[in-house]
Amino acid sequence: MPTRCRQWLHKHMKTTQELVSAFDGMTCRFEGVPFEFEVDYCGRGKAEVFALELVQTIDGTRHRRDDCHKVFNSHSDPHCHWSSATHDWYTQDQLDLALESDAVEHCDEADCYSESQYTCYCEHSGTTEHMTDVTYFDGEYYLNSSGILRMDGDGDTFLEGDADYYYCPAEDEYYHESRCHYCASSGEHILGGEDECNDCCPASPDRVFPYHRSGISPNIYRDFNGSGFAVGFEVEKNSVMGADSEGDHIDETNLFAYWETDASCGIEGVTHAYDPLDPDKIEAFKVDVNDAKDHINADCDSTCGGHINISSTAHSPRELMNAFREYAPLWYAVYRNRLTNSYCRNDKKIEYGNDKYSPVITKSFGIEIRLPSRVHNCEQLIRRFEWVGETCQAIRDGKTFNQYVKSCRQLLLNGAYGTNRMKYARVLRLARKFRVWMLDGIADQSIQQWI
């Protein structure tokens, strides 16, 4: 009996047998819940009154809840939020008739009763189950808790023990045989075909690799006595001398470490990394660029980009990003139209640097600047290398933003803007507006379309 109900009884009634017996069979509502009273005579003129909750059963009549059974009548999961899963109440006689007529079934896994339309027979376990406890696959129902249904790395369902699926330890996932291969060297199944495996098919920079599957690391051309900075480029093209797909042949050059497919355009070449402040490495970069002119000058469209990777032995990736942030407004002004595309849409203030689609992101080696547009030709790539050199010099020397802009003046004015002083002046104005926005959050009307 509810405590408050018991307190009310003790307050308003005497414990004589005559008064107590008046409650026997009486019904009432307490806090909206119907109850029926039952008297238990204890002898010696004493009795105990019990209030038993009533429920309305399937035929509309009321019966004691303790004498009835829940029968679930919806898709709601009977395991979760038990009280919220919709159900009807059945007396034992009503339940027996419903079971006999197959209108209701007992569900083994949930250990409950449910209307038959929400149950199914699971051949694998030989039991009848509530539909939330099974999964339909390949013409049969399987009990979820049995674990016989598995999901591979592509999100496809398969039966445990299916000989067409193999476990790939490197991915910690199962994959269909069409998606992986057995590598005799490692003794394991590996995601991808044999031609993508460095052990089965050694890496070679004279062919186009699948995206991020080359297995080749770019060389870093810097000396122990150099600046500690290194810069590499990703040059995206629709095709290079007919090569635009995985496996296509492409001539090797000193500049590019490898070429790989790219989802946004066609293929991209990943260059080696050069010290932008070492005179010898600067000269080597220019020679290597000119030797690779057939690759760099190849056609490209607006789907292509030109990401720049920077590392520093004196900075962690986070420190390097924070240092670059001081000079980022000038880059924003030059490449402002790139800020509105889907590849630079997030974290535009580069406060975090961990979002893939951000203008600048941190990597294990340093930072990747995603703002620059496509590389049209050798001259443009060399100018970008020189600009990155000015940026690295500013980071090393701790220059102010104004000092940095002044150091870049001749490079930008005589290069990118072809002595067009009006265009250059506009870029400087926008750069200062971008800087105010990045530092103070105040967005001038002149830059709102890009942020």
Image (tube, grey):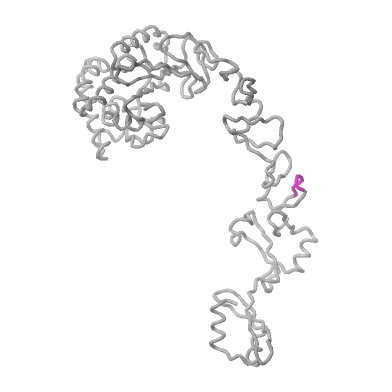
Magenta span contains residue 124: yes
In the picture, which quadrant includes the C terminus?
A: top left
Q: Which residues are magenta?
A: 121-125
> Left or right: where does residue 393 sit relative to residue 301?
left
Please say whether residue 422 is visible from this viewpoint: yes
Question: Please, what is the dominant secondary structure of the magenta stretch?
Answer: loop
Total tally of numbered discs in the picture: 0
Q: Residue at x 26, y 15 (%)?
A: 415
In the picture, which quadrant includes the N terminus?
A: bottom right
Task: Determine the image quadrant of residue 220.
Answer: top left
Please say whether residue 359 is visible from this viewpoint: no
In front of the other: 202 or 370: 202
Task: Estimate the x, y position of residue 243 in percent, counting from the top left.
Answer: 50, 12
Task: Estimate the x, y position of residue 340 in percent, counting from the top left.
Answer: 36, 31
Q: Residue at x 39, y 8 (%)?
A: 293
In front of the other: 220 or 141: 220
Task: Estimate the x, y position of residue 115 in percent, counting from the top left.
Answer: 71, 58
